[in-house]
Image: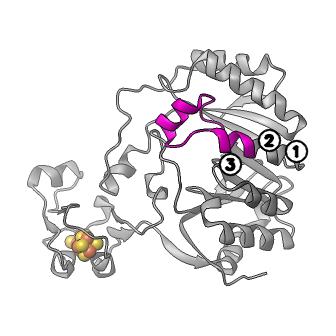
Amino acid sequence: MNEKVKGRIYDIQGYSVHDGPGIRTTVFLKGCPLTCLWCHSPESQRNDFELAWFAVRCVGLEKCGLCLKACPQGALSQASPEKSVLDHSLLTKISIDRSKCDNCLTCASACPSKALTSSGYDTTVEEVYRRVAKDRHYYGEDGGITISGGEPMAQFTFTYELAKRCKQDKLSVCLDTTGYAPGENYDRVLPYIDLFLFDLKHMDTKKSRKFVGAGNDLILANAKRIAENGGKLQIRIPVIPKLNASNENLIRTAQFCQELGQAVTLVQLLPYHAMGISKYVRIGRNYKLVNITPPSDEEMQKYLELIQSFGLPAQIH
Ligand code: SF4
Ligand code: SF4
């Protein structure tokens, strides 16, 4: 066991009730091989550090301005008054020219209020384990740690060692995965994972390539592989109108889940939402999925009943 193995994460959230059974602590790793159009964690997509901007934390150029002086690229300037007002503040804020910024993070080191900050940091297995173990008093029988991302399997050694460390201390471990990673790595980590939270985004491989940046062959093969090797799967289906929310896709997904048999403990339907848009603004990226409205409660209920009609345990998340 190597507790000094380093990983790059962007957040640890305690008291999470959305990332597996019970109350959990979720560790979010940076980096993902997929590029889902609806991703609501854009800061998780790249493994590199990125400059993030939290306008409300800035004390204003009148009082500070340290970042402007620090930037070696001249990428920072005074924001126009309209833009500062858009930041819901009467203070004069900064504007970032992302075409000049090389993410050196010198300004983040200079910023006393963390208005400019890095979207990730490096840590070790032991440091994360210690943080997670602090929360064990509220895990109860069902809760524990969830290793999420990004795609945690993209930092395989860190994920593997962290899962092993937590299991050594009898913590329940969930792994939230896209399924897009080498099959043999799922075999290796499986003994330390109580439940895989496994995304099934599209059953049509061409549409999968278009919407998430990769075909689904490896993903489906890994779901089968985990099931055949005795792993447990909670299948998660993001329901995105116009992209994958169709009877045809959900029927094919349900049929596939049936093939996985008893390995499937639950199928969760996750209705599309656009709450991650502000995060795109924060790191200077464009949100490509416009003109999509969340599915109505009636539509979600219809999809839920469709999945349940295949005899699968299912819920809307
Ligand atoms: S990250 Fe570096 S280049 Fe970018 S704005 Fe900050 S100091 Fe300038
Ligand atoms: S250093 Fe931070 S607080 Fe100061 S002006 Fe720049 S962003 Fe605002």
Q: In which quadrant of the rendered view does residue 159 lie?
A: bottom right
x%, y% of residue 230? 90, 49
Q: Nearer the viewer, residue 301 or 2?
A: 2
Asked if the residue under mark 3 is in contact with the one under mark 1, i.e. CB atoms within 8 Å, the reply is no
Image vertical order of residue 224 relative to residue 80, above or below: above
- Mark toward the start of the polypeptide (1 vs 3): 3
Part of the protein shown in magenta: 199-222
Determine the residue positioned at 66% across, 66% down: 156
Q: Residues within 10 Å of mark 2 (few under 14, many from 20)?
A: some
**Residue 93: percent from left, percent from top:** 18, 62
Do the numbered discs 1 and 2 sit on residues whose CB atoms are within 8 Å?
yes
Ligand 2 shown in quarter: bottom left
In the image, is the residue at mark 1 within 8 Å of ligand 1 by its beta carbon? no
Q: Picture quarter containing residue 166?
A: bottom right
Q: Which mark is residue 228?
A: 1
The foreground one among 200 and 53 is 200
Please give left or right for residue 178 compared with residue 223 in the image: left
**Crowd band around label 3 with a 10 angstrom C-alpha radius: few (<14), some (14–19), many (20+):** few
Query: Residue at the spot x=31%, y=76% of the render?
Result: 104
The circle drawn on residue 17 is 3
Element under disc 1: helix
The N terminus - image quarter: bottom right
Which is more foreground, mark 1 or mark 3?
A: 1
The residue tagged 2 is 224
Name the image colouring: one colour
Q: Secondary structure at mark 2?
A: helix
